[in-house]
Image (cartoon, rainbow, N blue to C red):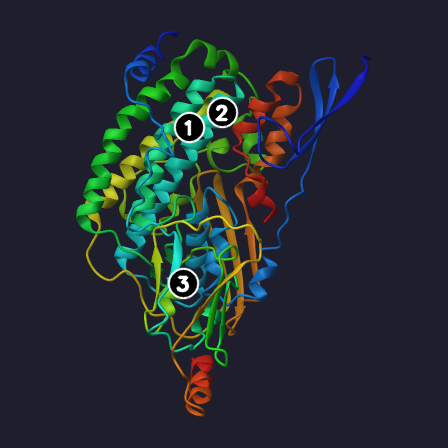
Amino acid sequence: MPNRTIIPFGPQHPVLPEPIHLDLVLEDEKVVEALPSIGFVHRGLEKLVEKRDFLEYVFVAERICGICSFIHGMAYSQTVEEIMNIEIPERASYLRTIWGEYSRIHSHLLWLGLMADAFGFESLFMHSWRIRETILDMIEETTGGRVIFGTCKVGGVRKDISNDTLQGMVRKTLELEKEIREITEIFIKDFTVQKRLVGAGVLTKEEAYTLGTVGPTLRGSGVAQDARTLGYAAFKDLDFEPIVEKDGDSYARCVVRIREIFQSIDLIKQAAAKIPDGPIDVKVKGNPEGEFFTRIEQPRGEAIYYIKGSNSKYLDRVRVRTPTFANIPAMVKTLQGCDLADVPVLLLTIDPCISCTER
Amino acid sequence: MSVLHFSKTVLKSLFGKPATLMYPVQVREYSDNTRGQIHFNGDDCILCGLCQKKCPAGAIKVSRDEQKWEINRFRCIACNYCSEVCPKKCLEMVNKYVTPRIAPDSVETFTSPYVPPSKKPAAEKGKTISA
């Protein structure tokens, strides 16, 4: 039996500015086992619900994650609205959908950049982020913030986008689509990129399902599961199919995310064409009483919100299950048997967001 | 499989304009909606304290007795909630970012010319709490 070595990976590592620690048990260059440990950035945001009233907590919920911030706020608001039987105006749900999809595009472009950086393609990383910047500018023009939108509230949205601006945004996004296609072609077709991704970290359909993975990691293994098909916000009126790739390797997960960018652009186009006029919020009266579970699709996968209130302006409990937490077992599985040099790439393919996992 | 997919982008980068701003020379213009910092217009303020109560970050402090309105810029998360709840609309979000400060707990203090009537304010304050 060869000698075993344990190599510590993280919580500070050049490839990943996320505080996750892995003990990599190696036999020569092969990883035999990976033992993850988290708990470096716990902020106690779920406990904070006892100190902030339920209308204010949406700002805290948005800060659970720095990338899918808007969708966190949206999931929280949706859950409270379900408990309180609030029906939000149609325009508000369309605006939420549009902003949600923009945040998915910017998250996936961010991930593509990080991925390019992980396999050593620095200029591709910068080009991905250059495109992302245009998306962020559009978000800033409409919401006021670049990554923390702050536009979601219980009962609707806080800001409106005029129809002209919306058409302008769609036009700009469609122009940007060409540039995104040009950059993503490199991920899909380039020889060196394929060398690093094809066949790396294969997760079969059964494994992905039994390990409870979510989001692009699950869809990259051939399971067509997307929480958006539940039809929350305006997704019930929009035409789309979950994007699925069959191979289950790093390349498949990368292609799923690339295709999802174009799907999001299409969804924004559809939503902008269908958006009705009208009010953007309703007045919230009373306090939430009861409990509810919400499933919502974030860029990294399905997040679950559980909220319990007992007719007080302070909620009893907010519980968040973030997609990265669900994907950690799959990550550990894919790391078994891989080369040490592949660890950063495999780690990134689940798009880990440790800060939101720990909250 | 190809190795020349990047060439188009490379040529564009070579002959195109830079994607970044030459920052100190060219100043970035923020959009009108950009949430930079809260601007306080003391003339209309009635020192009701709603902004203090609603601030999720606890950055605002209103002192009725001293006629003072204070904000800790480092605590402020620029969410714009205070300006939404302000009954006199004397708070607004401006698209200019906060200038750097040396002391981490530096508090900006403004005075309001509003003089609260002796008894009435207590009743009014009680009203806002129950609402």
C-alpha gap between disc 3 and disc 1: 38 Å
Residue under label 3: B81
Circle 2 packing at 10 Å, graded few (<14), some (14-19), many (20+), is many
* Secondary structure under the numbered disc 1 in the rendered image: helix
Callout 2, which amino acid?
Answer: Met
Q: Quadrant of residue B128?
A: bottom left
Callout 3, which amino acid?
Answer: Tyr
Residue A128 at x, y = what percent?
39, 26
The disc numbered 2 marks a residue on which chain?
Answer: A
Q: Residue at x 41, y 12 (%)?
A: A190
Q: State the residue lying farthest toward the bottom.
A: B119
Is residue A235 among the parts visible in the rendering? no
Callout 1, which amino acid?
Answer: Val
Left or right of residue B75, residue B2 in this image = left
User: Which dot, 3 or 1, sits closer to the camera?
Assistant: 3
Q: Quadrant of residue A174?
A: top left
Circle 1 packing at 10 Å, graded few (<14), some (14-19), many (20+), is many
Mark number displayed over residue A115:
2
Q: Residue at x 48, y 38 (%)?
A: A300
Q: Does label 1 lie on the same chain as label 3?
A: no
The disc numbered 3 marks a residue on which chain?
Answer: B
Mark number displayed over residue A256:
1
User: Which dot, 3 or 2, sits closer to the camera?
Assistant: 3
> Quadrant where the N terminus of chain A lies?
top right
The disc numbered 1 marks a residue on which chain?
Answer: A
